[in-house]
Image (cartoon, rainbow, N blue to C red):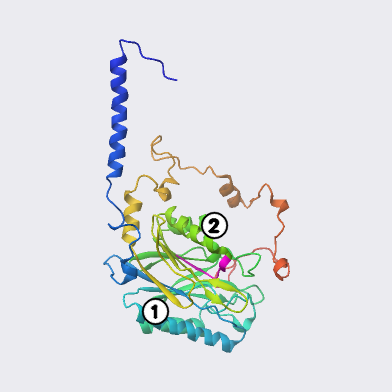
Amino acid sequence: RRSTPSSGSSSSGGSSRRSRRSRRATVVRRAVRCPRTTPRGGSSMSGLGGLNKSPNGLVVGLVQLQLPASVSTKAELAAQVAKVVAMVGKARRNMPTMDLVVFPEYSLHGLSMSTDDAILCDRVGPETAALAAACREHKIYGCFSIMERNPADARRMPFNAGLVFDDEGREILYYRKLHPWVPVEPWEPGDVGVPVVDVKGARVALIICHDGMFPEMARECAYKGAEIMLRTAGYTAPIKASWRFTNQANAFQNLMCTASVCMCGSDGSFDSMGQGMFCNHEGAILVEGSNRPDEIITCELRPDLVREARVHWGVENNIYQFGHRAYVAVKGGATDCPYTFMKDLVKGEWNLPWDAEVVHKDGTSCGFDAPTRLYDPVTPNGEAH
């Protein structure tokens, strides 16, 4: 659309264009020369799986726990608790530098989806006491899974919960799965938000399985300051591809490390896939497990590199730029909310164009009765919101 400059102005016009091109080229060259935010030698370095721990690193172990054949009685639940406790000891012996050991979703319960009170746990009960004692004995932080008896009303569905204990056996994180894997899972919708806690200088969050298929979950973790997001799961083999790319995308889109692990092996009916996986803040896979049951995948994660990238990155600093759109054009960027789905969700008016055509809207296809109770969340102490 530019007009052709007259002969009298061609010299100054050409000089101006060359000057603009020169400035752009200088910016590109400077971008190329920016310091690396990952160790030299490639983004896939993991301190040899944590053997060589750096002063700023957090060594994490992901346990690809063998899927139990049956957990249907109190005795079988106790036996599975003992198995997990023993694996905490194995983790410590396996890697003396390990700071945090992570067990998959359904570690105690198996994949039966049973809501039988005999195999449900309490947030404070004999099962969690044994797990906390194991962390204290072996001086290690631990992340665990329980199917929690509903403290507000035992007639309601249980919660799918996760807990982290520190190396003195104190609970530091408690989370209830926000997005059960419907229509397969019967669990109550989580109601305690997404907590972020300190683990030896790293800011850590926990989500569970299907949670990780929603990009908003990882964004919530990062927005609240998480540098490492744990994702525990019971997924089976058909989810393998989406498991991989969501773990990577959750990391890259939020400049956040992800550490994710599934149950592993067969219970005679289902085949869980293991597939422990660590991703760095660029979305690169650092370490990836196999499908071998009871294997412990280890990696050193570097929260200091996450912090550096979040502060110093310009291009692809997406977690910052999401709330500061087009800051080159307008001071501070646009900070409004242009997203219809966000506005509708806040107003309680979520409605897809094809909403009326959706076939599965309850758990009847998986053998559960259609619910009649509307959502009425309560606090972990059983009090109404």
Report, in whole angstroms, how far the alpha carbon at label 1 lies from the one at label 2: 30 Å
Residues marked 1 and 2 touching at CB (< 8 Å) = no
* Residue at image coords 42%, 56%: 283
Tell which of 278 and 382 is nearer to you. Answer: 278
Above or below, 351 relative to 185: above
Residue extent of the magenta highlight:
230-237
- Crowd around label 1: few <14 · some 14–19 · many ≥20 (10 Å): many
Tell which of 225 and 251 is nearer to you. Answer: 251
Instruction: Report which quarter residue 154 is drawn in.
Output: bottom right
Instruction: Report which quarter residue 365 is drawn in.
Output: bottom right
* Residue at image coords 34%, 61%: 303
Above or below, 2 relative to 244: above
Q: Position of residue 383 (x, y in %)?
A: 58, 70
Q: Position of residue 162 (x, y in %)?
A: 50, 72
What is the count of numbered marks? 2
Q: Which residue is mark 2?
A: 214
Above or below, 256 relative to 18: below
**Sequence-first tag of 1 and 2:** 1
What amino acid type should be assigned to the residue bearing mark 1?
A: Ala
In reply to whether residue 11 is colored magenta, the answer given is no
Q: Position of residue 132 (x, y in %)?
A: 43, 81
Tell which of 182 and 189 is nearer to you. Answer: 182
User: In the rendering, which numbered label is found on residue 114?
Assistant: none
Say whether residue 362 is visible. yes
What amino acid type should be assigned to the residue bearing mark 2?
A: Phe
* Residue at image coords 49%, 63%: 194
Answer left or right for 183 relative to 144: right
For label 2, the SS is loop
